[in-house]
Amino acid sequence: MNTPTKSAATRAGAIAARTAALAAASALTCAAALAQQPAAPGAEPIKIGFMLPYSGTYAALGTAIENGFRLYVDEQGGKLGGREVVYYKVDDESNPAKAPENANRLIKRDHVDILVGTVHSGVAMALTKAAKESDTTLLVTNAGADAITGPMCGLGVFRTSFSNWQPAYAMGPVAAEKGYKTAVTITWKYAAGDEAVAGFREGFEKSGGKILKDLSLPFPNVEFQPLLTEIAALKPDVVFTFFAGGGAVKFVQDYAAAGLNKTIPLYGSGFLTDGTLQAQGQAAQGLLTTLHYADGLDTPRDKAFRAAYAKAYPGTPPDVYAVQGYDAAQLLGAGLQAVQGDKAKKNEMRKAMRSAVIDSPRGSFTLSAAGNPVQDIYLRQVDGLENKVVKVAVKKLADPARGCRL
């Protein structure tokens, strides 16, 4: 039997070693190639892009919206439609001039599947334009500009908050039911104020009332005294107002200081007293407002939401902004569930969202063809630091969506 020489054995060993090394390298190359392959469609996460105010006047509102959205997703185990959810964030700074650039960061840089935002109507209108141009599904979680579900409506545009018209319109029949025949309106001269006043006028006049005069001052001017003097001279049965934030605080205080609250009732859209009661103090007590959410609804759904929110975000009371974020996640979840998480089925997902019934803390609601909530609007009265529900002012109120062509 021939035995290999030492030299032959060495050569054979070297060949074997090279063969093993090549095999190992080949295996690593295959593994790397597999790792670099795109994940199967069903495994890709849903990318959510928050474009919200995280600084400035509206920062607390942006945080509440995000908190509400995340709370619903967390309640579903961190998934929607069976898919993991990942988040991207941009601070919109409530600056319309920066809105196109900020929107494109999420759309073109981060390639998000869903846009969520925002608070400021001017920013939201720019965001809507960018969403439509890129065919990215948009969930509007606060901004009430009528145009978003009016002339700017689109198959991929949804709102889970309100239009400026809705809460203001609802106050019209409330005022008429109380026997008031004449009214004066007062607001800042800007889009939100104009749309709110137009809504109240429509509701009040349909109910037989008459507007004596529409008063306004430039945004954000708070020198109300000359206009309060004019209200006193006009002697209407009731005053309707749209102010928010610091302007709402000063107007309510000035109205009471002028003694007008003793002779002419003051009514308003809900933002007159939302987030402002601590600062308004005694001057706000008893004020009536209309909005799509209220304290003291006392429903199992609202109680459960409030308890879950308080546990998840201690020291931060749940508010209308958190509800709007929570319901945006619910709406998206309904769409993704219908397509079993396949985000490529964009049209089918959007159709399912349009036909969804949302089990909201505010009360269940559906969407109009234009994508705006068809929802109950509540009459609320200030009691201490709460806007307590009095009754449903108008049931299942749908925004007229004027100018929407779908």
Image: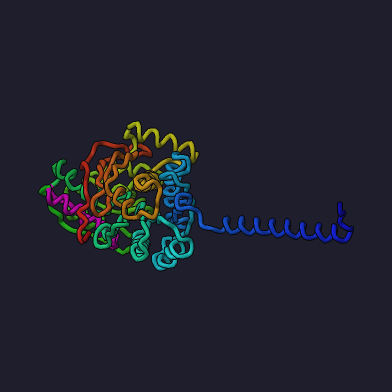
Report if residue 226 is visible in the image. no
At 27% from the left and 59% from the top, the residue drawn is 153
At 35% from the left and 31% from the top, the residue drawn is 300
In-front residue for pair 8/286: 8
The image quadrant where one finds the C terminus is: bottom left
In-front residue for pair 378/80: 80
Direction from residue 201 to residue 292 in the image, left or right: right
Q: Is 388 one of the magenta-colored residues?
A: no
Above/below status of 309 relative to 402 = above
Judging from the image, the colouring scheme is rainbow
Name the quadrant containing residue 396. top left
Magenta segment, prevailing SS (helix, strand or loop): helix
Give the mark count: 0
Locate residue 362, reporting x and y percent: 32, 40
Q: Is 201 one of the magenta-colored residues?
A: yes
At 44% from the left and 56% from the top, the residue drawn is 49
Report if residue 281 is visible in the image. yes
The residue at the far front in this view is 1
Locate residue 405, reporting x and y percent: 21, 61
Locate residue 344, reporting x and y percent: 39, 55
At 29% from the left and 51% from the top, the residue drawn is 351
Q: Which residues are magenta?
A: 181-206
In-front residue for pair 396/239: 396
Locate residue 73, reporting x and y percent: 44, 43
The residue at the far right in this view is 6
Above/below status of 387 relative to 139 = above
Direction from residue 383 to residue 212 in the image, left or right: left
